[in-house]
């Protein structure tokens, strides 16, 4: 680095742009675009592209357009157009007045096609799909010229006009670019640039019965909008010669196409086609099901836009395809939630705790800290009484070694409350514990108590008479662990049957006023947020993410304390836990 700047290193696209700016290429402009096809909802992979394109425009004081690549009328819908705009805005980006549609350019694209025909660079071909495939050759064998390749421009113009006029049936004629049937790059073997398709378009209605192919429309739309850097994913790398060929032959403004590696994440799927399958076959409850990797699903689940942006920054931009662990996204999310989420107590798997020596009708208001990470978040009052709900898991009849929670004969602190001594339990006929009994030490009230007594464990609780019942939806990954998946190529067979577990929990009474869209930390369990289906008489919460990753929990349960790297990880986890307390 020439300047020895200690700032974060630049990715290869920033380097290209900075060189271009130095050389005053494009008159020093930076203009990018995010070009979704409105045939599904956006997913977290798209978020990477959105952060990149809008982020570069911000960084270099340029502009970024939102453009709908709506050249395939059979799969597109205005529902998708609306959701895409919501998602981009929610992620924190703005296209101002630069919302475009490839379909806005249909007239111009048609005229460009006519120009190519006139220049002898395109022809109408009568081969059907099957013959065309055969004539195309293979990766190892060159293709064969179409018998219609050398028609005169006048004849081509006439046939193309007849295609446009609706005289030709679908699949019969196509307009093809005349490039090179022997090219080692299959995309240059006279690709189709226009096809007959007699379908209704969500914006142009029935005006057109010929539609441009993606590769033709895309580069020309970039050109028409004055885009300078056309950023796309790696699979378009060998479409670049075609992108360049079209713009060169027409002699129009020529953006530079630059490819980067798409985002792949473990334990989920990242293709609109597969996501649509999940929705249409009812494996999930819609595009915004909180298990989906869609932006709307993540938003509903309680992910924050800034955590997603931070994640995109963390993974960076490269030219090499790879797969990112879902746990990385979760750890970025936890880090942010830990600083912003208000704390509250909720019991997910309840059992009754009865304090035998506590006065029957007494209710005390206990003062609880809303967010230890944020002094401005203040405190709240939580009612405490004789009968409480506590987590079943916080009691053990036969405690394991180093058990710090409840068991008969031991003491724990009730968070923000008193130290209690566990005396006995009551079971039903089936042997299930129905009541845990204890006595409390009145001198140990949190904050104001005079006792010096200390105990190692603290557990959370809610007052049975005051708590609100709530449905909690506990999400797990959409896909099973690949090791448990027999046929990895069949993603439907890899769906995790336990991706949603619904339970009834008890929450603090104050949670009836929980703010929609805000994350909460249910102390000691997980982060939650109110679901859109929640109602004042039936609260519903989505689990956003657990407090620690299940890998480390599994390790602890199995007692496999390994040395070296694993040990270190355990240490980090402990630190994280401390922060969250
Ligand atoms: P999918 O393969 O999921 O159907 P797509 O590429 O067909 O996605 P588009 O609507 O064409 O979806 O994508 C809009 C933009 O988002 C494109 O520039 C595309 O390259 C980019 N994009 C799509 N998926 C990813 C991903 N997983 N990672 C990064 N960028 C992506
Ligand atoms: Mg696409």
Image: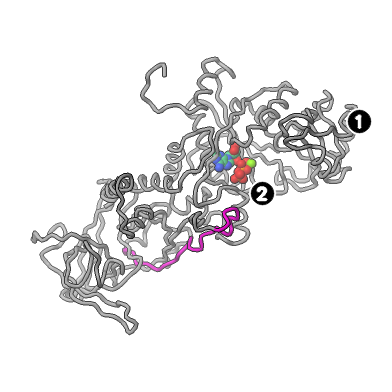
Q: Position of residue 259 (x, y in %)?
A: 58, 32
Dot 2 or dot 1: first in sequence order is 2
Contact flag, marks 2 and 1 (Cβ < 8 Å): no
In this picture, residue 397 sits left or right of residue 448: right
Q: Residues within 10 Å of mark 1 (few under 14, many from 20)?
A: few
Q: Position of residue 333 (x, y in %)?
A: 40, 46
- From the viewer's perspective, is residue 307 above or below residue 221? below
In terms of depth relative to the viewer, which is nearer, 131 or 3? 131
Quadrant of the image where one finds ligand 2 = top right
Q: Residue at x 49, y 55 (%)?
A: 483
218 shown above or below 453:
above
Is residue 505 shown in magenta?
yes
Magenta region: 486-508
Instruction: State the separation of the CA atoms marked 2 and 1.
Output: 36 Å
Q: Secondary structure at mark 2?
A: loop
In front: 420, or 345?
A: 420
Q: Quadrant of residue 128?
A: top right
Residue behind label 1 places its C-beta within 8 angstroms of ligand 2: no
Query: Quadrant where the N terminus lies?
Result: top left
Front in this rendered view, residue 333 or 288: 333
Q: Residue, x 24% and y 68% (percent of image)? A: 399
| Residue depth check, mark 2 versus mark 1: number of the one nearer the observer | 1
Which residue was labeled with disc 1? Answer: 155
* Residue 298 horizontal side relative to residue 249, left or right: left
Q: Position of residue 468 (x, y in %)?
A: 35, 67
Picture quadrant of residue 348:
bottom left
* Residue that carries the numbered disc 2 in the rendered image: 77
Q: Count residues near mark 2 (Cα–Cα under 10 Å), then give few for <14, some for 14-19, many for 20+.
A: some
Determine the image quadrant of residue 157: top right
């Amino acid at each position: 680095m020439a300047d020895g700047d200690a700032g974060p290193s630049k990715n290869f696209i920033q380097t290209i742009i900075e060189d271009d700016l130095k050389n005053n290429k494009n008159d020093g402009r930076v203009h990018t675009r995010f070009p979704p096809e409105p045939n599904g909802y956006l997913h977290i992979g798209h978020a990477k592209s959105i952060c990149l394109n809008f982020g570069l425009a911000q960084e270099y004081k340029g502009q970024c357009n939102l453009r709908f690549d709506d050249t395939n009328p059979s799969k597109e819908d205005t529902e998708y157009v609306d959701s895409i705009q919501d998602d981009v805005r929610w992620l924190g980006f703005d296209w101002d007045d630069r919302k475009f549609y490839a379909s806005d350019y249909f007239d111009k694209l048609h005229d460009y096609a006519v120009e190519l025909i006139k220049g002898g660079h395109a022809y109408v071909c009568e081969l059907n799909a099957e013959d065309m495939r055969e004539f195309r050759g293979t990766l190892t064998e060159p293709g064969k010229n179409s018998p219609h390749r050398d028609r005169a421009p006048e004849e081509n113009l006439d046939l193309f006009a007849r295609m446009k006029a609706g005289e030709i049936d679908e699949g019969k004629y196509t307009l093809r670019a005349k490039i090179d049937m022997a090219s080692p790059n299959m995309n240059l073997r006279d690709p189709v640039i226009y096809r007959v398709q007699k379908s209704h378009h969500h914006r142009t209605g029935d005006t057109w019965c010929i539609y441009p192919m993606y590769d033709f429309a895309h580069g020309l739309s970039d050109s028409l909008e004055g885009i300078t850097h056309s950023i796309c994913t790696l699979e378009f790398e060998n479409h670049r010669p075609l992108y360049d060929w079209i713009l060169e032959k027409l002699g129009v403004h020529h953006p530079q196409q630059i490819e980067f590696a798409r985002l792949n994440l473990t334990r989920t799927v990242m293709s609109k086609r597969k996501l649509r399958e999940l929705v249409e076959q009812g494996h999930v409850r819609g595009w915004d099901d909180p298990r989906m990797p869609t932006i709307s699903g993540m938003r509903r689940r309680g992910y924050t836009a800034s955590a997603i942006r931070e994640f995109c920054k963390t993974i960076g931009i490269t030219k090499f395809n790879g797969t990112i662990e879902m746990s990385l996204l979760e750890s970025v999310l936890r880090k942010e939630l830990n600083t912003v989420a208000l704390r509250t107590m909720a019991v997910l798997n309840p059992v009754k705790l009865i304090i035998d020596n506590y006065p029957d009708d007494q209710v005390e208001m206990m003062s609880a800290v809303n967010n230890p990470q944020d002094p401005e978040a203040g405190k709240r009052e939580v009612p405490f009484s004789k009968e409480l709900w506590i987590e079943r898991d916080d009691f053990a009849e036969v405690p394991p070694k180093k058990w710090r929670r409840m068991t008969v004969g031991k003491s724990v602190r009730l968070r923000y409350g008193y130290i209690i001594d566990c005396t006995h339990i009551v079971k039903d006929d089936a042997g299930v514990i129905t009541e845990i009994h204890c006595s409390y030490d009145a001198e140990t009230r949190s904050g104001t108590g005079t006792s010096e007594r200390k105990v190692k464990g603290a557990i959370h609780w809610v007052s049975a008479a005051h708590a609100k019942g709530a449905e909690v939806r506990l999400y797990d990954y959409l896909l099973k662990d690949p090791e448990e998946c027999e046929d990895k190529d069949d993603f439907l067979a890899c769906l995790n049957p336990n991706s949603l577990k619904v339970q009834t929990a008890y929450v603090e009474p104050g949670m009836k006023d929980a703010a929609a869209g805000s994350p909460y930390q249910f102390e000691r369990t997980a982060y939650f947020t109110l679901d859109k289906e929640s109602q004042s008489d039936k609260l519903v919460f989505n689990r956003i993410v657990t407090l620690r990753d299940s890998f480390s929990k599994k390790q602890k349960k199995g007692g496999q304390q390994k040395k070296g790297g694993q040990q270190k990880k355990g240490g980090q986890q402990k630190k994280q836990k401390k922060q969250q307390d």
